[in-house]
Amino acid sequence: MNIPKSSFPRVVIIGGGFAGINFARKIANKNVQVVLIDKRNYHTFQPLLYQVSSAGLEPDSIAYPLRKILKNHKNTFFRLAEVESINSEKNEITTSIGNISYDYLVIATGTKTNYFGNKSIETYGMPMKKVPQALNIRSLILQNFEQAAITNDKENRKALLNFVIVGGGPTGVELAGAIAELKNHILPRDYRDLIPEDMQIYLLEGSPRVLPTMSKHASKKAAQFLTKLGVLVHCNTFVENYDGKKVLTNLSLELQSETLIWAAGVTGNPVEGLRADILIDRANRYKVNEYNQVEGYNNIFALGDICLMQTDAYPNGHPQVAQPAIQQGELLGKNLIKLIEGKPLKKFKYKDKGSMATVGRNKAVVDLKHFRFAGFFAWFVWMFVHLMALVGFRNRIIVFFNWGYNYINFDKAARLIIRPFNKLN
């Protein structure tokens, strides 16, 4: 890998997500050598992926080069590679570009899409976990509009204009609202030969309410906002099969649709090589103690979505969202230096800053510790928090400008088919 030898301990980080970059920032410029490895050369701000999918933002607005994040930190290196396995006995990992040894290893590989064993959905459904996947969805939506404009087959047009989103968590709710705004504001202006009422957006959620991890107040308001936008919400509904044309559910509901977007769950993205018994079944998350040490290993740590830390307050682990990953990364950065220096470590305690979701223009819900609110002010708070959380001043300026332009003009300027998507490939 062409990493120079150093008299300092080598810390290898796998993954440049929220956990990985916050840990790297905190430990950089200390008496350690830091090597960050990721299969992409950029950090993705995943909470705004849905806006790339719905033509609201370009991908470079929510992605930031990992090398740029590390450029001002001495003794810190980045390598573009895919990690294949870990050899804990040799303190070594194998990657697509070679092997590298470590003194301390930090696993921050996040999650991947969980299809719950449904092969038909895995084959024909559209996931949205990565920038390329978000671009695929954007292209497919716009290609469907173009195809619907030229077809004379009413049933085919209906299938092209039916969009099914599976999963009523924040991602599904936000995406459903964004696509509804495409229907309400873009379709009448750009596609005057189409009837907006022919386009339907279905949101299918398996639990009794949307946003099941948020308060009942937030769920109720979100459902009201979605209905007002024209989204058809179906709770207690599971998708059993999808062949690329027809959606079959556990109820009598059958939908003809060319587009099914899967936002119904994630599972951990572990690396091969560690003991199988440290992975929590189904969740695929590493068991860690309150210092984020992987169970049974003194010099291997796991952060964020890939780890499961059981506490009295969170017996099933912390929520797989950005804040636990950021907080764990920052604390481990401090703790690892203490460990090297032989000082006592500080236990991790999650500070829940609340949760929020936006449904569309002037519509959002916010749950804080002591109060909840919805509507325009919640939408403003949601925008401010996400804007400030973006990595890089340039990205904040671009997103702010795009949001302002979209708000004034009811426009989504990124509706470009740069890379056509073929569902058969």
Image: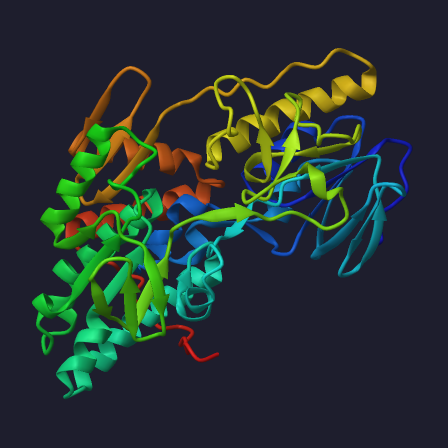
Picture coordinates of residue 99, whole percent (x, y): 84, 53
255 horizontally vs 85: left or right: left
Residue at the bottom extreme of this rendering = 152
289 horizontally vs 204: left or right: right
Q: Would you identify the image quadrant in which residue 388 lies?
A: top left
From this view, report whether residue 387 is shown above or below residue 127.
above
Q: Residue at x 22, y 50 (%)?
A: 177
Q: Residue at x 24, y 81 (%)?
A: 147
Q: Residue at x 28, y 49 (%)?
A: 205
341 horizontally vs 324: left or right: right
Residue at the top extreme of this rendering = 344
From this view, report whether residue 222 is shown above or below residue 243.
above
Q: Is residue 346 visible?
A: yes
By what rule are the colours in the image chosen? rainbow
Q: Quadrant of the N terminus?
A: bottom right
Picture coordinates of residue 290, whole percent (x, y): 63, 21
Q: Residue at x 25, y 58 (%)?
A: 412
From this view, report whether residue 418 is shown above or below residue 19.
below
From this view, report whether residue 334 is shown above or below residue 198.
above
Q: Would you identify the image quadrant in which residue 299 lies?
A: top right
Picture coordinates of residue 369, whole percent (x, y): 33, 18
Numbered marks: total? 0
Give whichever of 73, 224 is nearer the camera: 224
Picture coordinates of residue 219, whole percent (x, y): 22, 35
Q: Is residue 411 visible?
A: no
Give whichever of 403, 182 is nearer the camera: 182
355 horizontally vs 104: left or right: left
